[in-house]
Image (tube, helix red, strand yellow):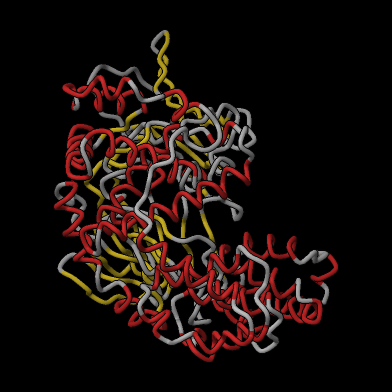
């Protein structure tokens, strides 16, 4: 923010835990001061320019600073937290408001900028950023280091600046795509993300040209606690994320058209889920899109139950006055947002008609940031011949009322019915009925349906051990490597007190670090009294290799006294 009075010009930047050494403006020393520290917004850095400004004048402000070891945007992994175990690893995660702990900046999604960067790393390591790679050279100040250069020419918000440094290798998997990871994962990742170009082409047909040039995928070390992040030119994914249609879709909704403030986060996520499911419709079928929508409605119900149906954070457009955007994070903006868009699609003439609006909205607001009001005004302008339908929508209930949406769409249940039928058959089976199950029960289901079948069983009382052993004998679920299937299957086995599943569950809990897998697996084993001590032993043995966010939460789940455990 520029502020000018009586010819004193002050530039205010966001910062958090930065130690600022000096500031210059056009090469002249500039006075600066740090304002009062806010609980989650950090500290304003106020820079007083040493000269007057005239309209249109260019100013180069140079800030020399150091980040803190506790910078919230940066995760420093020790060699033992990586796959290779030899070199340290750095990655950043700036969304929603953590870029200020890495770079002094105007850290709001309402402002977009291009960027250029040079990064110096030891020569055994490689640096990549959320930008197009722009060459490299030996560091003239230290021949043991290499400087990597990056250029991002498409304006973007600060939360999409991203940096990684580690012992990285890459493989080309398409005309505009490389996959990056440690060498232990790179060939597996190249195979798993081989569909990327087909998804990009489908997304372009739906939403318009892909403007970012390169679309690379970085597979993070297994200790990364989240699923993925849509950094431009370089999507972050984990080894367990197999589908990146969601992150690809963000190249249009979120990265190109961005929510103006985090209260309007549903504009990013609701439209991205809508576009992701439209890609699924093109590559699979309309029934598949409907099936994913049913799963999404369940996720929304879970979030509403967790927050409480009267919690204002379950509004589609919440008020975040004095609330950190991190605390408001849930599936509400994703799935309540999708439900609204799907409801409007039904009212306004079906998927082709409504996708026409979404594409037009992206073209209209590309390279800018928008509010819900601007989105709604454009919706009314685009469908000007259907305003009577739009006026019947209960906008207040959808946008500003907590809890579940006012209308539940009628989704096609064809693909879900097969999962319900098979789960009911197992739940009702007596021992003498177990021979009626056949391998073809699951062979005719897609992996998404197998996930749903197991999820339905996990919602009920544990199956008898005889049933679970029979399920393994017929379906051989231990052989499935899909992380979402394996995670649910191992939980089911441990719940039914199958002792042989315990080491498999603990292995999955420690081989990767996604919180959505690691925490529930440890909890299931911990709740199996006979193996409670084993769960604690395995956790303490692996804790040093875990991400600090993950190990802290598992400590709470397993009721570990952190100070006591540290000495063991």
- In the rendered image, residue 223, in percent from the top left (x then y), is placed at 54, 70
- In the rendered image, residue 455, in percent from the top left (x then y), is placed at 53, 66
Q: Is residue 436 above or below residue 260?
A: below
Q: Nearer the viewer, residue 290 or 173?
A: 290
The residue most toward the top is: 6
The residue most toward the front is: 432
Q: Is residue 53 above or below residue 468?
A: above
| Residue at the (52%, 38%) spot, across then down | 404
- In the rendered image, residue 67, in percent from the top left (x then y), is placed at 53, 50
494 left or right of 86? right
| Residue at the (38%, 45%) spot, across then down | 410
- Where's the N terminus, which quadrant? top left
203 left or right of 243? left
**The quadrant where residue 243 appears:** bottom left
Q: Nearer the viewer, residue 456 or 103?
A: 456
313 left or right of 416? right
Q: Nearer the viewer, residue 508 or 50?
A: 508
Query: Is there any visible trace of residue 144 in the rendered image?
Result: no
Q: Nearer the viewer, residue 48 or 126?
A: 126
| Residue at the (35%, 40%) spot, across then down | 157
- Where's the C terminus, which quadrant? bottom right
State how many labels appear: 0
| Residue at the (62%, 42%) spot, across then down | 307
Query: Is there any visible trace of residue 193 in the rendered image?
Result: yes
């Amino acid at each position: 923010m520029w502020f000018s009075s009586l010819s004193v010009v002050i530039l205010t930047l966001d910062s958090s835990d930065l130690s600022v050494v000096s500031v210059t403006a056009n090469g002249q020393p500039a006075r600066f001061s740090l304002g009062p520290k806010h609980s989650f917004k950090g500290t304003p850095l106020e820079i007083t320019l040493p000269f007057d400004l005239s309209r249109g004048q260019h100013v180069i402000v140079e800030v020399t600073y150091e980040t803190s070891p506790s910078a919230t945007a940066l995760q420093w992994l020790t060699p033992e937290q990586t796959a290779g175990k030899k070199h340290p690893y750095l990655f950043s995660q700036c969304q929603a408001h953590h870029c200020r702990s890495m770079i002094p900046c105007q850290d709001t999604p309402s402002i977009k900028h291009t960027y250029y960067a040079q990064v110096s790393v030891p020569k055994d390591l490689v640096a990549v950023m959320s930008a197009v790679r722009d060459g490299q050279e030996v560091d003239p100040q230290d021949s043991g280091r290499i400087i990597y250069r990056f250029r991002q020419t498409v304006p973007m918000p600060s939360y999409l600046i991203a940096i990684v440094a580690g012992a990285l290798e890459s493989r080309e998997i398409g005309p505009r795509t490389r996959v990056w990871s440690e060498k232990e994962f790179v060939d597996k990742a190249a195979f798993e993300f081989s569909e990327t170009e087909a998804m990009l082409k489908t997304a372009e047909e739906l939403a318009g040209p892909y403007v970012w040039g390169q679309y690379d995928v970085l597979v993070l070390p297994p200790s990364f606690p989240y699923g993925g992040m849509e950094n431009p030119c370089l999507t972050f994914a984990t080894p367990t994320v197999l589908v990146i249609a969601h992150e690809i879709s963000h190249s249009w909704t979120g990265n190109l058209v961005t929510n103006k403030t985090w209260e309007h986060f549903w504009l990013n996520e609701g439209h991205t889920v809508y576009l992701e499911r439209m890609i699924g419709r093109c590559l699979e079928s309309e029934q598949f899109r409907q099936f994913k929508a049913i799963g999404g409605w369940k996720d929304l119900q879970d979030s509403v139950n967790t927050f409480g149906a009267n919690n204002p954070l379950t509004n589609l457009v919440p008020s975040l006055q004095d609330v950190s955007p991190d605390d408001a994070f849930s599936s509400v903006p994703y799935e309540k947002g999708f439900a609204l868009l799907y409801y409007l699609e039904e009212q306004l003439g079906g998927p082709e008609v409504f996708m026409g609006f979404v594409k037009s909205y992206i073209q209209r607001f590309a390279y800018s940031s928008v509010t819900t009001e601007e989105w709604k005004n454009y919706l009314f302008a685009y469908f000007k011949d259907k305003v009577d339908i739009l006026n019947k929508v209960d906008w207040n209930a959808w946008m500003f009322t907590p809890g579940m949406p006012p209308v539940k769409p009628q989704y096609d249940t064809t693909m879900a019915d097969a999962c319900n039928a098979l789960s009911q058959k197992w739940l009702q089976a007596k021992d003498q009925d177990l021979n009626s199950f056949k391998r073809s029960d699951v062979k005719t289901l897609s992996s998404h349906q197998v996930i749903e079948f197991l999820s339905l069983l996990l919602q009920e009382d544990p199956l008898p051990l005889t049933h679970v052993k029979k399920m393994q004998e017929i379906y051989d679920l231990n052989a499935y490597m899909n992380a979402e299937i394996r995670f649910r299957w191992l939980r089911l086995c441990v719940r039914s007190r199958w002792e042989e599943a315990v080491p498999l569950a603990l292995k999955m809990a420690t081989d990767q670090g996604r919180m959505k897998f690691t925490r529930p697996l440890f909890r299931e084993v911990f709740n199996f009294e006979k193996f409670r001590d084993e769960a604690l032993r395995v956790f303490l043995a692996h804790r040093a290799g875990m991400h600090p966010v993950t190990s802290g939460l598992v400590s709470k789940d397993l009721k570990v006294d952190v100070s006591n455990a540290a000495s063991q």
